[in-house]
Amino acid sequence: MASSSSSTRLWSYDVFLSFRGQDTREDFIAHLCKALRQKGIYTYMDDRLQEGDEISPTLFKAIKESRTAIVVLSENYASSTWCLGELMEILACRETKQQIVLPLFYKVDPSDVRHQRKSFGETFAKHEGRFKEGTVQSWKVALHKVANLFGWHLEQRNEFKFIKEIVQVVSRMVSHTYLNVAKYPIGIESRVQDINVLLSIGMSDKRMVGIFGVGGIGKTTIVKAIYNLISYQFEDSCFLANIRENSKRECGLVQLQETLLFEILGDSSLKIGNVDRGINVIKERLCSKRVLLVLDDVDELIQLETLSGEHDCQHAFQSDKPNDDFVELTEHALCYAGGLPLALAVLGSNLYGRDKYHWKSALEKYKRIPEKNIHEKLKISYDRLEESEKNIFLDIACFFKWENVEYVTKVLKKCGFYPNIGIKVLMDKSLITIESNRLVMHDLLQDMGREIVRQESHKEPGKRTRLWFHEDVPHVLEENMGTNKIEGILVELPKRGLIRWSSETFKKMKSLRLFISRNAHFSAKPTYLPNELRVLDWAECPLQFLPSNFHGQKLTVLRMRNGLFKAPKEGFKNFQNLRIMEFIHCKFLIEIPDISRIPNLEKLDCFDCESLVKVHDSVGFLDRLTDLSFLYCSNLISLPRSLKLRSLENLELGFCSRLQDFPKIECEMECLRRLVICYIAIKELPSSTGYFTGLSELYIESCKNLMYLPSSILQLQHLKFISLKNCTKLAKLPTKEFETPSSTELFSSPPLGNSCIFDDGCSSIGFL
């Protein structure tokens, strides 16, 4: 915060000067105060003579409201109880308000101050005869503390240059932008101080300190507080946030290197080009600087090596680096640990002194069965969850890691697990995080959850609640060893394979809620599906129709991909809880039948269903449908004759080359934000397109029979973007005065080329 920055200042003064007036007021302090103020640094200096032992309330207030205190320790400083009182208050503010304290040793030796020798020792000998022992001892402790802080020593140096150096440092410090730590930073002060001791700022060598832990425990909060506390002591400083996320982007590490160099050197023209060059540039340009670098959210060694140098793992080798024969195995161990300090310590201790064959065997085992000590420590947070929250955690660990939060919430809600509060609880306990709207879980926490399920029945996987392991799943299905205990199955094999099973395998699994199959095909089609199913997500499903004995009343998600599935001609019955219905690459699907009995359907997606010809009119009257998509349905001829979809947000019609008619719009559809129409044979859009009152994006591309756009398009006041490409028969645009709340533009009718873009609410037009 600069000295003149804003009306919301946290401090009344940038600097408070504490000094012994008789020693320094008329020359050094006067020149220092003048230089600080000329630099725009708001400085408080007590211009009155210091008389008596009591400090005025005004002075106390000035100390508390100062961002920085410069304590000028001169020969007779300690003889003034006024000065000692100031010092006590300054150090108290350092503890409670994170005030920055800078000692300045004016013609005295810091060690004499620190150990109260020479004039300081003589002065305290006099104080001991006048004041209580406890008071004098507290003054001694205060002087010892302040003498141990980073500061300046005048010695025999030129005072003008000395003052100039002080002003430069203070100016850099008070103009520095501090990081927002937390609204209520409770309990971090002791941890900040511990790490500050580890850093040993006064030492001249390089120092690297890492803070490890699962997400949510306050690592970033702590390092922000440390950065704010010590950054002024460095020539330059840089805080790089979100390393893990940013490094995953294209050229992410290069951009981080460039950001680091810009923050420190201030040269925006410096371009790196590649990571290796960046490493050398950082070494060369920063080698002579005293720099504080904070890297937040590091999850890979390459990030440390790229931005700050090498990083070692010493638990396994008790030395700076692993033996050459163990380099690759060490990388596997670090990958398994995932940056968790507990895991690094346990693995290192377990593997110390072992040969590489033991290492390899142990690491293979840990992939299947987590190390006991790690598992038990991580399980502590799980054990404190309520039953519903435990089920949510186990479902995420076994089936839903990296899945969309909204999708998982819908499924878990139908399972009776109260996910809206449950997911929040898991986040609060650092068991999961949400990134880009997807559920994320540390690999070791996922392993811990899966181990909890494995321990339900060590030898008989069919008696566990959840199956996911690529060896257990085929064993249970092929040997018909399923039981009523099984609630969820994930079929995800190392490579696509055949599962030879009985058509009645599911009959023993009446509690099955979730069945997800991704890369296997099956020797027989099941004659029975459990009525407890909430999710049926089946790639290469052998079923043409759902079994007649399957009621489907609890089914929430129906996903069929690359299979034989055909929708029943009589429609779907008793599927009132179905929310998502997707048919992907279903080459035998001919018709979307009557789905009026699925009133809660929110998403219908038919992708690359090449035999699909007709979509029943009932699809156009689903009040809760938000997403409707038909892409690459090359034989699609008939859509619903009209649409009355009040909740629809996204409509996609693409690469349906035989589709000639666009449905009539029967009501205002204010929720629709995005409409995509491409590579279809329509000749015109209906005038009722004007009912898309909430539309913001309209894409009409390669509709080569399209001749007219209705003038009602010009009435869509929320429309921000229109794209027209390769609509070669579209002769002209509607000609009409177009009004928005902010602008009026008269559209002419210029000839169109291959593409046309409307932008900014259609108030301007450009041609490509």
Image: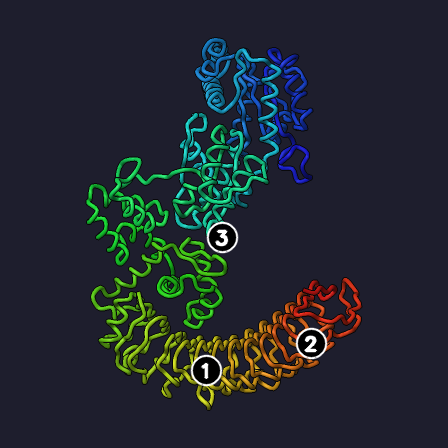
Marked residue nearer the N-terminal end (3 or 2): 3
Q: Separation of disc 2 and disc 1 at Cα? A: 43 Å
Q: Is residue 533 visible?
A: yes
Please tell me the numbered disc located at residue 575: 1
Q: Residue at x 44, y 62 (%)?
A: 422
Which sits in the foreground, 614 or 717?
A: 614
**Residue 568, image quadrant:** bottom left
Image side of residue 2 versus residue 404, left or right = right
Q: Is residue 388 visible?
A: no
Q: Residues within 10 Å of mark 1 (few under 14, many from 20)?
A: many
**Which residue position holds label 2?**
730
Amino acid under label 1? Phe
**Which residue position holds label 3?**
250
Q: Residues within 10 Å of mark 3 (few under 14, many from 20)?
A: few
Quarter of the image where the C terminus is located: bottom right
Amino acid under label 2? Leu
* Position of residue 554 measured from the top left corner of the image (x, y, whole percent): 42, 78
Residue 596 vertical placement versus 31 (above, below): below
Foreground label between 3 and 2: 2
Q: What residue occupies the far bottom of the structure in this picture?
A: 570
Q: Separation of disc 3 and disc 2 at Cα? A: 39 Å
* Position of residue 558 measured from the top left corner of the image (x, y, whole percent): 43, 77
Marked residue nearer the N-terminal end (2 or 1): 1
